[in-house]
Image (cartoon, rainbow, N blue to C red):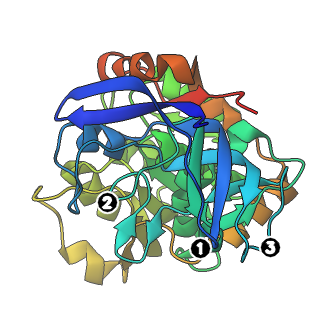
Amino acid sequence: MLFRSKALQFMSPNVMAVNEINKPIIGDDEVLLAARSVGICHSDIELLEGRYIIPFNYPIIPGHEWSAEVIEVGKKVNKFKKGDRVVGECVIGVEHFGFSISGAMAEYFIAKDAWLHKLPDNVSWTQGALVEPFSCGYYATVRADNLDASDTVVVFGAGPIGLGVVAACAAKRARVIIAEPSAERAKVATSLGAEHVVDPTKADLVDQVLKLTDGKGATVVFDASGRPEAMAKTLEVAAFRARIVIIGISVGGSAPAQLGLVQAKELQIRGIIGSPGVWPETIRFISRTGIDLSKLVTSTFDISEADKAYQTVLNDKSQIKVHVTSKAN
């Protein structure tokens, strides 16, 4: 007898449905997982629209930000057992889980044991599903070279990644300034440890930052907005010998920039993508600092309403992070 599982499937560009599919059968090096919490990312929307960065085929099950419970393990799996709480990485060599490989937006799904990490007991299912986006923000702080309590940080953009940067910097006791026009998102940033909010639509951004830093500027600047004009402004708000980390992606975008400031201020500028090699470190950081990333989740839906969750993301721009949950045994 075949057991059935609810799953959200992208059937073709801009067409999705919650369908009943056969419960997956695992291989010797695979793990059967019951999804507990799955986040929706902007890249999932790109997948739905048919324009993801690597090849894929419809139908496809999305879901690359997730936490899950181990239900069954293959014969060659010895690191995990039934009942373990786990999260899993997205980029698997040339493949992307939840994109070129069907993902976690289902009651049950499978993953290779090599992709998985155990979730500490003090990290909730919701927090676990935020490990993937938070790891990008955490990795940015690692690439900022010895960021600590002596630093004054400016973060451009209070989306999920930018808020992760705020939380990581605040946990490292840095002074954090968030540049964000949305009052609701700025409020979340403040709850995660940002000390000051500057609204770039109400007054000159550079003037606001210089006023808060006694005319010196920020020692570390992160752009998580992906807006070319914001990337250009990072040079202007940076202090002498500041470190600048560009996280936001702007494919083909451009904006005028005062490039002479790179030399005049002796700036270090780094671009990053993803979070290579830092998942175990990220999970330990969340567990040991006790930061509450669940504040990023603004709406939650059951797996049976996963399509409605995606419609909410598409139609309500006030959402920060929407999660889909399941209680399948």
Estimate the spatial distance between the alpha carbons at disc 1 and disc 2, rounded to whole Å: 22 Å
**Quarter assignment of residue 286:** bottom right
Residue 233 screen position, x and y as percent: 28, 55
Residue 116 screen position, x and y as percent: 66, 65
Residue at image location 63% in from the left, 28% down from the top: 325
- Dot 1: element: helix
Estimate the spatial distance between the alpha carbons at disc 2 and disc 3, rounded to whole Å: 49 Å
Discs 1/2, front: 1
Q: Which residue is mark 2?
A: 236
CB-based contact (under 8 Å), mark 2 and mark 3? no
Residue at image location 89% in from the left, 50% down from the top: 121
Q: Which residue is mark 3?
A: 79
Residue 192 screen position, x and y as percent: 68, 39
Residue type highlighted by circle 2: Glu
Is residue 132 placed above or below 23 in the rendered structure? below
Work out whether mark 1 precedes mark 3 in sequence or the reverse, and give the earlier one. 3
Residue type highlighted by circle 3: Lys
